[in-house]
Amino acid sequence: MPRRIILHAGFHKTGTSSIQATLRENRIALKKYAALRLRWHMQELVSATRGYSTWRDPLTLIKAQDRFEKLMDGLPGMPRRTLIISDEELAGHLPGRGDLADYSAAPVLLYAFWEIMTKRYPEAEIMLYLSTRAPETWLKSAHWEHVKSSNMTMDMEAFHERYHAASNLEGMVSEIASRVPCPVHHTALEDCRDLPLGPADPLLDLCDLPLSLRSELVAPPPMNTRLSDDILNAMIAANKANPTSSARKAAKAAILAEARAS
C-alpha cells in the first residue's frame, strides 16, 4: 500500500508537460521513493474524462470511474512509497472546445477519483496537486494550443471574450477544495521560474524525498514553449485556407518546421 497518493490533475498549459517530463527523466532515481502513473498509463481513462467534460452524462462518468478503478488494479506493490498520478486531462478537456467553457467537470471527476482511492487505500494520505497560471498568460497559451492542434480560426481577442471565465484557475482550485475532502495544494507557474526543476519542484516537495536525492535530479529541456504571434497568425490562416484535417496538419507542420529552423 502506498503511504501517500498525490493526484496531479491539471490544469492544462500550466507547466504540466514539464512536470511529467521531469518525472519521466528521473524515474529511475525516484523509483525507491515514488511510483509513477503518467499519461501513457491512462489513455483510456483520460478519453473518458474528456468525454465527461464534454457531455456531462452519468454513463460517461461511470466509464471514467471504472477506468480509474482499472488503473488502481494495475498498480505495483508500493510498500511505504508515494504514488504520483499525473495527467492534466484527469480534469477533462482543455476549455475552448465549442461549448466547453470552463473546468466545471473537474470537481465531479476528482471527487469520484478521491472516493475510489479512499476505499482502496483507507490508510494512505491522499492529496490533490493543481498547477495554475495567471489568467492572461493562460488564455494566450490555451488559444495557441487550440490553434495548433485543431481547426480553430478564432483570433486571440475573440477567444478571450468567449472563454475568459475559464482562466480563473485559482477560483477553480477553491471550488475543488470545497468539494473534495482532502488537502488540495497548488502553485502558480510564475512562482516556479527560478526553481531548479521548474514547475516539478512544488510537486516533489510533497513527496518528502531525501535532500541528497533532490540534488541529483535533473531538469529536461523546456516543453511546449509558445512561439511568436506571427507564427500563431500564420497557423490561423492555414486553418482558414485548408478545408481538410490532413491539409491543415501538413500546412501547420511546415510552418512550425520553418520557425524552428530559423
Image (cartoon, helix red, strand yellow):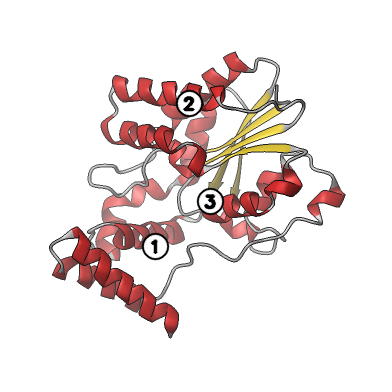
Tell me the kind of residue under disc 1: Lys
Residue named by callout 1: 140
- The span from disc 3 to disc 2 (Cα, nearest Å) is 20 Å
Pointer 1 with pointer 2, Cβ within 8 A: no
For this rendering, which residue is in front, 104 or 33?
33
Alpha-carbon span between mark 3 and mark 1: 16 Å
Mark 3 Cα within 10 Å, few/some/many (few <14, many 20+)? many
Q: Where, quadrant-wise, is the C terminus in this rendering?
A: bottom left
Q: Which numbered disc flags the more N-terminal residue, 3 or 2?
A: 3
Closest to the camera, between mark 3 and mark 1, is: 3
Q: Label 3 amino acid?
A: Thr
Name the secondary structure under disc 3: helix
Q: Is residue 3 depicted above or below 252 in this figure?
A: above
Give me the disc on residue 67: none
Q: Is residue 153 visible?
A: no
Q: Tell me: 60 left or right of 125.
A: left
Q: Label 2: which residue? A: 68
